[in-house]
Amino acid sequence: MAIDQPGTTGTPDADEDEPDDIVMSVRDARVSFDMARGQAWVLNDVDLDVRRNEILAVVGESGSGKSMFASALLDAVEDPGVLGGDVTYYPDETAGESQTIGSFDDGLDDSVDVLNLDPDELQAFRWEKVSMVFQGAMNSFNPTMKIKDHFHETIQAHNAVLEERMDHVRTLFEALYIDFDRVMTSYPHELSGGIKQRTLIALALVLEPEVLVMDEPTAALDLLMQRSIISMLRNLRDEFDLTIVFITHDLPLVGGLADRIAVMYAFEFVEVGATRDLMKNAAHPYTRSLLRSVPSITSDVDEMEPIEGARPDPVNIPTGCSFHPRCPVSDDRCEIEDPELAAVEDDLQAACFYTDQSREKIDYTLEEEHTEDDR
Amino acid sequence: MSTDDATDGEQHDDETEHADEPLLSLSDVEVHYDMGTGIERYLSDKRVKAVDGVDLELEENDIVVLVGESGCGKTTLGKSAVGLERPTGGSVTYRGQDIWEAKDHPRGADIEFREIRRAMQIIHQDPANALNASRRVRAILADPLKKYRTELGPQEREETIYRYLEYVDMTPAEDYADRYPHQLSGGEKQRVTLGRALLMNPDIILADEAISALDVSLRVEMMDLILDLQETFDTSYVFISHDLANARYLAKRAGGRIAIMYLGNIVEIGGPDEVIQNPSHPYTEVLRWSTPSMDPDVAMERIKEKPPVRQIDVPDPQDPPSGCAFHPRCTKAREACAAEDPELYDAEDTEAACFRALDNHEYWSSPELEDAEGSGTAELGVGD
């Protein structure tokens, strides 16, 4: 398993002083589908590090490749799709003994090459090290099984100790405000969407994975439930030392949640940075245009503007920078050359040649005037 | 011009244009569903009150955005408003004509039901399912013309189709007319459904979450298109949305109103700034709190706050709470709220269905409400 050292590639100017302990790193990940019209690239040589214990939001519009990225983290790209590149998982060395919950044995390796695991190893890896909550997954409970049986099935499939795990579930349920006794003896249809979704999050965490990947986990839920789950996720992260990768199309939703945001456009990351820096003064023209196109309850309605043009076709991605046909600051260079992610500031990278012009030309405001008369 | 509560139960029989009648008037509309299947339906008296006594008026060139969470009855109310769902109580009148009366007793009707049907159109949430996948755009748009505009010959029909495609910014129209729905993007599909609705020259369009299936960056564009066309065609809209930010955008740009719904009732209604900046109903405050702020500093503070409710889960609509339906979740609820169901009262800037809007209501002397039993209320300590 010859693997690059974490933190040394792809992120040229990453701040080395920070305790940037990396839990997963993705290098040159690409997914392609053969289509009648040609080969479609739905993930295009992306590099990204996931830092231990962070909440990383991957934000993109539909068809930007964000779900593919999520699937790539678990080598779970569905069949006609072909995944290439490297996905590496670095176990927490400080965790020591507590590592032996299920059947996955990371042995003495200090890193795991996820794309080269054999099927049994992969199966164990997926729940015990990196776990995923899929989009609309609250409908994935078996309607003929009680909630309890779903938990038992998962625990037993991983040869874990049932009682010890169920005790853990109790603490998870507490953190998620779920009534343990009532929900465990219920059938899925007896539960509301919000409770089902929270139960599913608990199920994903039953084997104490280090990383939780969530694909639009709140999309089908009501606003208040969305907000409540977002708050709970922050607490879960702190309480259970989790790393969370949160995939969403909803940039405002993650503003208060994520430590870092990675913005995808046309199957690539175009901007990655600390949430506050990225939201307050984004560098990439796409991110800025996106922030200008999303109304909030305080935004000036006359300032809102949609992003001109249509999103690119995966079979026929524009040459050079894939955003150039829609970009207000692009020029000839952008048509030919594809910009790489490069540092703009300490904790902000953007894939754009003209970040200064972008900031100058594309205006947006986020500030809320404080007319706080809440309760 | 206030044409308040529809007490004028009888239609005026004047032959003229009903100029004094509102375009659309809903009076005490109820939609109750029997629960269960087969015999169970008759034996049990369980009913879900999807819409429970709503009054609403719509003027010419008006926009009302119905906002609420899933299951609050906003779609059912919207469908009743445009005659797609028959209310189990109350009345819906179009220019003074009760629309179900027109259907049941066509002879006595001033306005034919068919004409009412034409005047009220709907745009569905998911454009992909609203268009027949095996027919070209041209054929999809020709259907309503063949049915309602029989005076048009094939040539004129063709021209009309192109003209409407251009209205919804789909140019070159000839090219788009030949496409199948799968050859269109989500936004383009939604424009076809908008164009199809407009072909009928309707007075009212119900847009049921018409933009929620679109990419976030395209929503503003679609809303702008709808607003532009509203001016061109003088159409009134009933917009349904679960998103307060989009509701505000539409209502503000169009000078319309926002109506907040909760468990079958409109709990607050008013102008967008008034409803959002100075709400009088605690539920509106909850919605506003739940809408994420774009400002990361504000958002990071907010996420540590407790939600301003006693419990996050919505009560079972089959077994709604007594009195004010919101009281078990309301942080301001007192015992009076459990006893009596509030109506819409004139509040500070809006109309709100909350006793707190009345200065001399017994609410103010009523004792605080005990925590509801076993509802997991106090444990809502979200935050750190």
Image: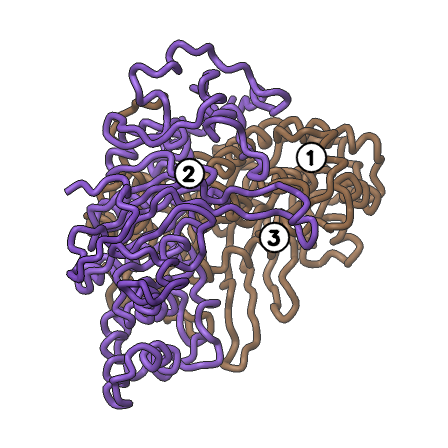
Chain colours: A brown, B purple
Give the letter of the chain under mark 1: A
- Amino acid type at image mark 1: Glu
Pair 2/1: label in front: 2
- Amino acid type at image mark 2: Asn
- Circle 1 sits on which residue? A93
Secondary structure found at label 3: helix
Residue B33, position as x, y percentages in the image? 55, 48
Q: Can residue A96 be seen in this view?
A: yes
Give the letter of the chain under mark 3: A
- Image: B241 above or below A43: above
Secondary structure found at label 1: helix
State how far apart marks 2 and 1 are (Cα): 56 Å
Residue B134, position as x, y percentages in the image? 48, 80
Quarter residue A181 falls in: top right
Q: Which residue is drawn at 81% across and 45% down?
A: A153
Q: Do labels 2 and 3 share a chain?
A: no
| Label 2 close to label 3 by CB (< 8 Å) | no
Residue B287, position as x, y percentages in the image? 40, 35
State how far apart marks 2 and 3 are (Cα): 45 Å
Q: How many labels does the image show?
A: 3
- Circle 3 sits on which residue? A73
- Image: B246 above or below B163: above
Secondary structure found at label 2: strand
- Circle 2 sits on which residue? B265
Q: Can residue A8 be seen in this view?
A: no
The C terminus of chain A is located in which quarter? top left
Q: Do labels 3 and 1 share a chain?
A: yes
Q: In this view, does B111 lie to the left or right of A74?
A: left
Nearer to us in this view, A274 or A164: A164
State how far apart marks 3 and 1 are (Cα): 20 Å
